[in-house]
Amino acid sequence: MLKMTLLNDNSEVVSYNFADFPVRAKKSLLSDYPAMAAANHWHTDWEFILLLNGKMSYSVNGKSYELQEGQAIFINSEQMHYGYSADGSDCSFICILFPPSIISSITRIRETYILPVCEDTSNPFFILHPEITWQRNLIELLKNVYELCNEEKDGFELHVMSLFNTICFSLYNNIKDSISIQETADDKKLEAMHNMTGYIQKNYQKRITLNEIAAAGNVCRSSCCDIFKLILNKTPVSYLTEYRLEKSIELLKISSLSVTEIALQCGFTGSSYFTEIFHKTLGCTPSQYRKKKFNNI
């Protein structure tokens, strides 16, 4: 059974390309996600999203920004974020994640260059524009990381580590003097959202009530709904349903699981309701989606 693993603080345990080399470098489409939106989440890894074509709306700590083709975004450690389509249009993108700790084993480097970036509250994210030289160079470095991780040629890990050090220096050297345009919800609301989305991600396979979601954030039902609306622009129930659909797509890759088994494992009451919601959201049935996307399994 596939299930998102969370740490005690409700941060996501990132799924990497390699079991023994903590790097995620993958290409995706927004249409791969239910309702063309990733689940709101957070982690300690640095994350980069590069828009290959199309456009993407991106939410960081409750404030949305639009990314255009050729641009990229850096999301700092421990920031709540997710990408989505605001108008139903699709886009392709590269997602790269790696923990800052991978290049901070030396105390001097960690305290001088890594922590100042991670702890820079004025820059929880940064949009990279290809028209600006240092930002264009950083985007090219990220593309190189993606290519190296997917080609897996001999010694690619050493090359990737070298690029990570260059990326870190670029962030430290340039972002620290930049002015952030970030506008966020207050810290208490963000903390409540961390806890409520974490509760959903841990318990989506079970029956979950609005009262339980609100209790996880130590807020009342109305405040729970208000916070979801403010930060995610959706209801807690909508978030829960979309998260269940996202996990169901992962399970559809497993050909031995029936649609009914997937429905029950993802918290739906039965295959009929699951199929109805799936079709309403993605425009096809789970079986049709499986055949179209995973017909090689």
Image: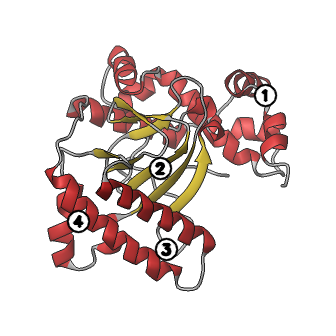
Frontmost residue, 142 versus 78: 142
The residue type indicated by label 2 comes to Leu
Left or right: 270, with 240 as reference point:
right
**Position of the C terminus by quadrant:** bottom right
What residue is shown with label 4?
A: 114
Nearer to us of marks 4 and 2 is 2
Q: Give the x, y percent position of residue 13.
A: 46, 56
Q: Which residue is mark 1?
A: 284
Q: Is residue 274 left or right of residue 226?
A: right
Seen in the picture, residue 51 relative to 227 is either above or below; the reply is below
In the rendered view, would you say 296 is above or below 203?
A: below
Q: Which numbered dot is residue 50?
A: 2
Q: Is residue 141 above or below residue 241?
A: below
| Labelled pair 2, 1 in contact (Cβ < 8 Å) | no
How far apart marks 3 and 1 lie (CA) works out to: 37 Å
Closer to us: 283 or 27: 27
Between discs 1 and 4, the one toward the N terminus: 4
Give the labeled residue for mark 3: 21
Local packing at callout 4 (Cα closer than 10 Å; few below 14, some 14-19, many 20+) is: many
Element marked by disc 3: loop
How far is disc 1 from disc 4 in space, using C-alphas? 46 Å
Question: Mark 1 falls on what kind of element?
Answer: loop
Residue found 57% across the figure and 57% down from its top: 26
Mark 2: secondary structure: strand
Depth check, mark 2 against mark 1: the one in front is: 2
Q: CA distance from mark 3 to mark 2?
A: 21 Å
Q: Is residue 214 visible?
A: yes
Q: Earlier in the sequence, mark 3 or mark 2?
A: 3
The alpha-carbon separation of the residues under discs 4 and 2 comes to 22 Å
Residue placed most toward the observer, 174 or 35: 174
Q: Position of residue 210 (x, y in %)?
A: 46, 21
Report the label total: 4
